[in-house]
Structure formats: structure tokens, C-alpha cells
Amino acid sequence: MKNINLIGPFWKAVSGGLILLSVLSFTPAAFAELTDAQVAEIPAGDQPIKFSHKIHAGDNKIQCQYCHIYARRSWSSGVPPVKVCMGCHNFVATDLAEIQKLTKYWDDKKPIPWVKKHDVPDFVRFPHKKHINAKNEVFPDGVPCQKCHGPIETLDVVEVQDPKFGEMGWCLKCHLTIPGVKERKKNIKDENGKLPFAMHPKGHHRPALTDCLTCHK
């Protein structure tokens, strides 16, 4: 009898079923449904589309890095491309006027001209990935977005919450709480002969977070 390989067709059927189940489980019913009248009550701000972090990150518990996909791997957190928005809004709240604005940007193949609110001077080096991935006694799971941006998940309209945002003293106030910064005993050279690291009393190597060149180009 000729051997028949059933694994391929079987796996295709199983994987197809899993994909279908995942799609069915991710339905608009899982989100708080809004009407145009309710959206109209959201403050407009100066953005081209009404985007409420409160609705997305607060009410619907969408993680920041689901949309800001570059934060953990790049210097910039990244403005979400329209493709990320349409990943949900292809089938979530498609009848809302604000979502139809989004869809038009998608159809026209144009980026949404969001107005940037959080910015630091060009001479300041701020790598998001270093902060998101930081793990130490103060931030065992990395620096949370709220540490710099405030309670972003409660805001309909994003504005800078701390008027001192991005100032050197504001940054140093946080950096000086990291164990090993004030207590460091000596600098040690890295493989390139540079001195970017500090020796923590417990023997851990920590960035020299108070050195000028840590933050300035």
C-alpha cells in the first residue's frame, strides 16, 4: 500500500482552525462601542483625528507598545503607522466619522499628520529602548511610560503633564535614584577603551548616568 502523508493536510486544517478561532475571539464586541454623539463629546485638541488614549489604553487596556512598536527596539517610540490603526479599525467602529477619516488616510496611502507633544532638544540623547528595557532595583520591569509621560491612559487629549519635562534637572532627578550612580567607586573601560560604565558597590556595571556624554551628543 502506498504511504499517504496526512500530516501536511492535518496541520493545515488545525492551523487554519486556530487562525479562525483567534480572529473570531477578537471581535468588536470585545471593545466598548461608541456612537458619533459620544465621540463628539471628546475634546478635539489640535490633532487631525480625535484619538483618545483613555479609550484605547485606559478603557480597552491596549498596551502602549502594541501601537508604539519601536519603543523597545529603537531610540524613538515611533508614531504608529496607519497600518497599525487599521489592524483593528478594519472591523472595529468602522461606521464612526472619525474612523472614516482614518480610513481615508489609509485609502489615500498618506500618513496621519499627528502633532507631536513630547519632545526634547536635538542636542539631547534619549533612547527609548534603553529606558523601556532597563531592569534594576528601582525599575525591575523597565521604566514605565507613565514615568515620563504621566497618566497617559487617563487622557483624552495628550498634553505634556509636567512643565519641566525634558529639562536636565528633571532627568537627573530620576537618574540620581538609580542605585550605584552616587555610590560608584570607579569607572572601568569597555572593549573600545571608553569609560561609559560605573561600578556599582554590589559589583554590577551600571551606565554612568550623570556623565554629560550619557545624554548629550
Image (spheres, rainbow, N blue to C red):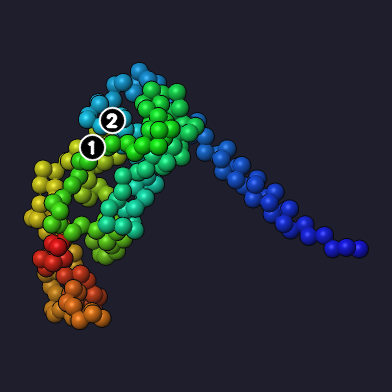
Q: Is residue 89 left or right of residue 158?
A: right
Q: Earlier in the sequence, mark 2 or mark 1?
A: 2
Q: Provide the residue designation for mark 2.
A: 48
Regarding residue 154, the answer to whether it shows in the image is no
Q: Is residue 29 left or right of residue 120?
A: right
Quarter of the rendering containing residue 134: bottom left
Q: Provide the residue designation for mark 1.
A: 115
Instruction: Calculate the distance from the C-alpha at mark 2 to the C-alpha at mark 1.
Output: 8 Å
Q: Is residue 180 above or below residue 8?
A: below
**In front: 162, or 82?**
82
Graded by Cα atoms within 10 Å as few (under 14), some (14 to 19) or many (20 or more), the crowding at tag 2 reads some
Q: Is residue 177 left or right of residue 24?
A: left
**In front: 140, or 68?**
68
Residue occupying image coordinates x 60% and y 42%? 21
Q: Quadrant of the C terminus?
A: bottom left
> Which amino acid type is marked by label 1?
Val
**In front: 83, or 66?**
83
Residue 25 is situated, as x and y percent measured from the top left of the image, at 55, 39
Q: Quadrant of the N terminus?
A: bottom right
Residue 98 is situated, as x and y percent measured from the top left of the image, at 36, 26
> Which amino acid type is marked by label 2?
Pro
Residue occupying image coordinates x 25% and y 26%? 44
